Image: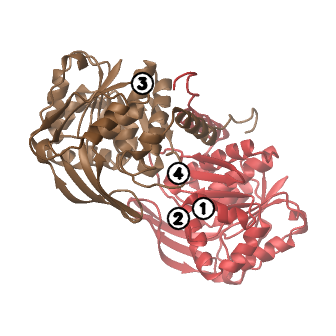
Chain colours: A red, B brown
Amino acid sequence: MAVTVVGSVAIDDIETPFNKTGEVLGGSATYFSLAASFLTDVKIIGVVGSDFGRDYLKIFKDRSIDAKGIKIENGKTFKWKGRYGYDMSDPETIATELGVFSSFKPKIPHNSKTDMLFLANIDPDIQFDALKQMDAPRLTALDTMNFWIKGKKEKLYKVIELTDVFIINESEARLLTGESSIFLCAKTILKSGAKILILKRGAYGATMFAENKFFMVPAYPLENVIDPTGAGDSFAGGFLGYIDNTGDMTFDNLKKALVFGNIMASFAVEGFSVDRFLSVKNGEIKDRFKKFREITYFEELPEGLL
Amino acid sequence: MAVTVVGSVAIDDIETPFNKTGEVLGGSATYFSLAASFLTDVKIIGVVGSDFGRDYLKIFKDRSIDAKGIKIENGKTFKWKGRYGYDMSDPETIATELGVFSSFKPKIPHNSKTDMLFLANIDPDIQFDALKQMDAPRLTALDTMNFWIKGKKEKLYKVIELTDVFIINESEARLLTGESSIFLCAKTILKSGAKILILKRGAYGATMFAENKFFMVPAYPLENVIDPTGAGDSFAGGFLGYIDNTGDMTFDNLKKALVFGNIMASFAVEGFSVDRFLSVKNGEIKDRFKKFREITYFEELPEGLL
């Protein structure tokens, strides 16, 4: 079993009110694959320029991630420079240089065509093209952003129709559907074809909708957030990695997968770039899951109370 | 067993982007007592003017709330006029007329001196005075607001030191302590004497801290919020009502009390003024608690996963 991810592998330059990084490894496919790698085999489909460091490739290798699908082209790697305010939420983009990513045309290799597939936040035309190359993916999941919702809504809806799980921010869901209530957002999106909708709420957690089913969790509470970059992709990586590992698509198991995604996102933001994923131990992940269950668990009402 | 509440009984005039009320029953003690009345006996200590409607007093009577402690004085009842924006969160205050509330001096009657006590959001000097009149309250809880944190911080800390449970908004806790992290906020506040701290996060739920213990829940998800006024006081009413009814102060039971508070707040905002409390049935409250447990419950990780 394996998960294939199609998305960006990038060089980030991040500033928070408390620190800055200079150039570091980033990109949606990067965060996704590292988070998923704790539970399953991962293959990345992406593109980088000739400036992409060998030490970055070693990061994937060290976590047994198959990076053969990362094409190295003449030119520059996708660069993103961003700055977080004191709320440590939506960053301001200082600069974006697409480089070789501007002509990214993913080719799904033969051995990936029945994998689970994660389409990270890229042009819906490219997502559509990648999806069409799959034979019989066991599960497909999709992310997007405001830019594509505004510019390519029709194509995006086509991709949603063809994918199983749609993972976006609550505010993006409102923009996409024109509905204020998250329940009406969910109704509209589930009607358009996705079987599962996950709405991310940043530091406030996530909600998951299926037909007639619903689940919500707060975010894992952290004393110190260092760098929120990649939280959403790490969430998706934990979520799909968990499903792929357990092979169980019941809603009860998807709940645990969502919590697992939550936990992987909590590690992602505890360090700059992907640093925390390089040090985190399996035991820490298990402990955090257990702790999260303790701090959100409560018993039933006593009989005869009301 | 009974809970006594000291706070405002007011006449509100509320506007939302979707509707407006004209003059309706409001006030922190009002919402608190109605929410708590589903689980225990409640006594209100407050003051109103001669303009206060008999039909309002009947609302308390119909829910078996002891309103003998509401003094009727010559003058006007406390009036608050507020307007909510599209986010339906912090309202803009259009007008405040304190009326007879400006010289409110609560007298705790003899039969209340061992009750549980809720000190709703009023001047810390008045809260202190009320607290001093108690003999041996089984539990005391406290609310406040930015205005008192800014103007009477020292006296407020004195009241916190003497109460068991402190219930405030997350942003107020930051203002009070000067700490950004909610864990550091909690540490500071618990060190100053409160045994339990509850941080409300509006539509995002609530967190509860005790020494070395922690619990967090999202808000009960609603399709339609009509009027957020009184949500926090209804939360406190549900919380204390539950504890008084069950008589169990273990942290596991406080968790359920917090969820019960959450549920009562969810009803409060489903109608203008206290309307929803006049129609809600015990069965609906139980169903909502059960539903909330379903949508937040998840199982443990499988053995040997990591």
Quadrant, the C terminus of chain B: top right
Q: Position of residue A193 (x, y in %)?
A: 75, 65
For badge 3, the amino acid type reads Ile
Q: Which numbered dot is residue B222?
A: 4
The residues bearing labels 3 and 1 have C-alpha atoms spaced at a distance of: 36 Å
Q: Position of residue A47 (x, y in %)?
A: 72, 75
The residues bearing labels 3 and 4 have C-alpha atoms spaced at a distance of: 25 Å
The residues bearing labels 2 and 4 have C-alpha atoms spaced at a distance of: 12 Å
Residue for badge 1: A184
Is circle 3 on the same chain as circle 4? yes
Are the residues flagged by discs 1 and 2 in contact, CB closer than 8 Å?
Answer: yes
- Dot 3 alpha-carbon crowd within 10 angstroms: few under 14, some 14 to 19, many 20 or more: many
Residue at left offset 8%, top offset 41% = B74
The chain letter for the residue carrying disc 1 is A
The chain letter for the residue carrying disc 2 is A
Q: Position of residue A230 (x, y in %)?
A: 58, 61
Q: Helix, strand, or loop for circle 2?
A: loop
